[in-house]
């Protein structure tokens, strides 16, 4: 490091920054305004994306229906359980109780 830096006077003081012209000030202000506007817009876009990224109750309900439908098609045990549940809700009793010999219950 040099003792005498180009940025310092002989007495060790740092020279004052040259004054900006009014046009340069306006340009700097406009640049800062654009930067702040871009940051605000980025935050708003991020917030909007995070809000739309979450799924609604209806979407969850549809997904549950699709999973239940696939289980109903793919699993005989689940199909039998669903049949028993609906029969017991409608008639109030287990109507499939005596059908074990036929492979139903």
Image (tube, helix red, strand yellow):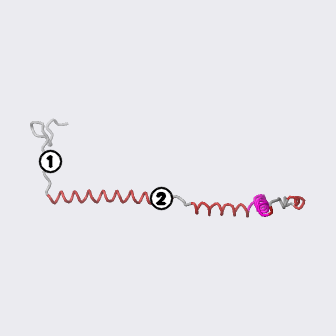
Left or right, 76 with reference to 31? right
User: In the image, what residue occupies the spot 43% across and 57% down?
Assistant: 47
Cβ atoms at labels 1 and 2 below 8 Å apart: no
Q: Which mark is residue 91?
A: none
The quadrant the C terminus occupies is bottom right
Percent of width and height locating residue 93: 82, 59
Dot 1 surroundings within 10 Å: few (below 14), some, or many (20 or more)?
A: few
Q: Secondary structure at mark 2?
A: helix
Secondary structure mostly taken by the magenta-highlighted segment of the chain: helix
* Residue 83 is a magenta residue: yes
Distance from Cα at disc 1 to Cα at disc 2: 47 Å
Q: Quadrant of residue 72?
A: bottom right
Percent of width and height locating residue 102: 89, 62
Q: Count the marks.
A: 2
User: Residue furthest toward the right?
Assistant: 101
Camera-side residue: 83 or 6? 83
Camera-side residue: 15 or 4? 15
* Residue 30 is a magenta residue: no
User: In the image, what residue occupies the spot 17% across and 37% down?
Assistant: 2
The quadrant the N terminus occupies is top left
Sequence-first tag of 1 and 2: 1
Q: Secondary structure at mark 1?
A: loop
Looking at the image, is 16 positioned above or below residue 76? above
The residue labelled by disc 2 is 51
Camera-side residue: 51 or 67? 51
Camera-nearest label, 1 or 2: 2
Q: Quadrant of residue 10?
A: top left
Which stretch appears magenta? 74-90
Looking at the image, is 47 positioned above or below residue 1? below
Dot 2 surroundings within 10 Å: few (below 14), some, or many (20 or more)?
A: few
The residue labelled by disc 1 is 17
């Amino acid at each position: 490091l040099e003792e005498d830096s180009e940025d310092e006077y002989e007495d060790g003081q740092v020279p004052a920054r040259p004054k900006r012209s009014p046009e340069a000030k306006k340009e700097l202000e406009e640049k800062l305004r654009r930067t702040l506007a871009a940051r605000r817009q980025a935050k708003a876009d991020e917030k909007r994306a995070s809000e739309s990224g979450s799924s609604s109750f209806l979407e969850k309900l549809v997904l549950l229906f699709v999973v239940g439908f696939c289980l109903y098609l793919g699993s005989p045990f689940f199909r039998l359980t669903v049949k028993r549940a609906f029969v017991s809700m409608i008639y109030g009793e287990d109507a499939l109780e005596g059908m074990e010999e036929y492979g139903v219950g």
